[in-house]
Amino acid sequence: MTTDPVTVVPADPLPRTRWVTSWLALVRWSVIRHAYFLPVVAAVQVLFSVAVIYGIPLMLPAVDETTARYVSTGTWTLCTLAVGCVLAPQLLSVSKVEGLLDYQRTLPVPRSALLMSDVLVWLVIALPGIVSGIVAAQLRFSGYITVTLTVVPVILACQVTVLLIGYALTFWLPADASSLATQVILIGSLLFSPIVYPSDRLPGWLVTVHGYLPFVPVSRVIRHFSFPTDGVPLAPVSVIVVWTVVAYVLCLAALSRRK
């Protein structure tokens, strides 16, 4: 009587281990793929933050503590928008046109790992601009405000939200439309949003609209944790959480769909 040999099939790695392994490999791939691009973007971010910190006060008749707070936190918010709604979507749009995004969809990796690997890389790219903006604000407004690097984690958390929104727009809109949308977001936030100036300078209806969009709440949260006041701003935090969840779901849906 003979017995057939038993073939031992190795067990699949735990889902969490597989996710981390895939995520680390994708991060490495993304860094290698953008190696030429990372230093340039980081340098542009540094120049942008310093230029806004020192440029906007030149257009104002005087600088006081309120102005210093709005210009400082507004600049950090604009830095997150420049990365999350302009630079990252533009590069993603190129990947769509070149077919790289379609190739990534075929990889046997979790869709969330694919998305979050890009998010981590862009957080690293954004970091020099954020830190230089904080240092520039402290130097420019040293007589009015005191800023520490403890606000950096808050800004990075807000950066995740903005990145997911920018990616969701790029995933679901045609290349030309997404490019136009991201440019409108940045210009509108700079000129027509109470980000670098108080909300009392805008019509009430426009302030109400901005309260339901994600970018002004981001600036309010950053301002609160930079210059703490009593209580946590629950309304802006709630708006940010809702937009983050919606954008994340849209991104995963776009990465999971089949043509």
Image (spheres, helix red, strand yellow):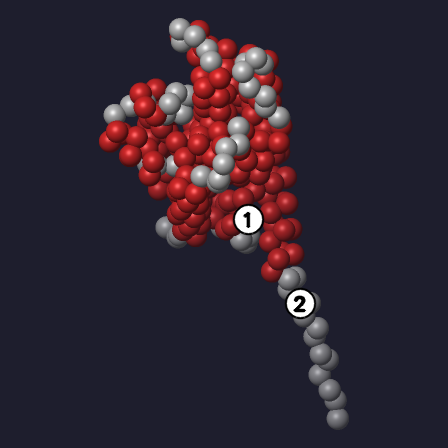
Q: Which amino acid does label 1 sit on?
A: Ala
Numbered badge on residue 17: none
Please, is residue 257 above or below residue 84 in the view? Answer: below
What is the CA distance from the residue labelled 1 to the residue labelled 2? 21 Å
Q: In the displayed structure, does residue 6 sit left or right of residue 97?
A: right
x 55%, y 35%: residue = 154
x 57%, y 38%: residue = 120
Question: Farthest residue toward the front?
Answer: 230
Question: Farthest residue toward the bottom?
Answer: 1
Inspect this view and state whether residue 199 appears. yes
Q: In which quarter of the image is residue 5?
A: bottom right
Inspect this view and state whether residue 38 appears. no
Q: Quadrant of residue 235?
A: top left
Q: Give the position of the N terminus as an image quadrant.
A: bottom right
Q: Circle 1 — which element?
A: helix
Q: Circle 2 — which element?
A: loop
Numbered circles on residues, count: 2
x 73%, y 87%: residue = 3
- Return the x and y of residue 250 as percentages of the image width and height: 39, 47
- Return the x and y of residue 51 as percentages of the image width and height: 50, 13
Q: Which of 97 and 144 is in front in this view?
A: 144
Question: Farthest residue toward the right?
Answer: 1
x 41%, y 39%: residue = 236
Which residue is the site of mark 2?
11
- Return the x and y of residue 216 as percentages of the image width and height: 39, 31
Earlier in the chain: of badge 1 and badge 2, it is 2
Q: What residue type is labelled 2?
A: Ala
Q: Nearer the viewer, residue 200 or 256?
A: 200
Which residue is the site of mark 1?
113
- Return the x and y of residue 172 as percentages of the image width and height: 35, 42
Q: Nearer the viewer, residue 77 or 1?
A: 77
Mark 2 Cα-neighbour bin, 10 Å: few <14, some 14–19, many ≥20: few
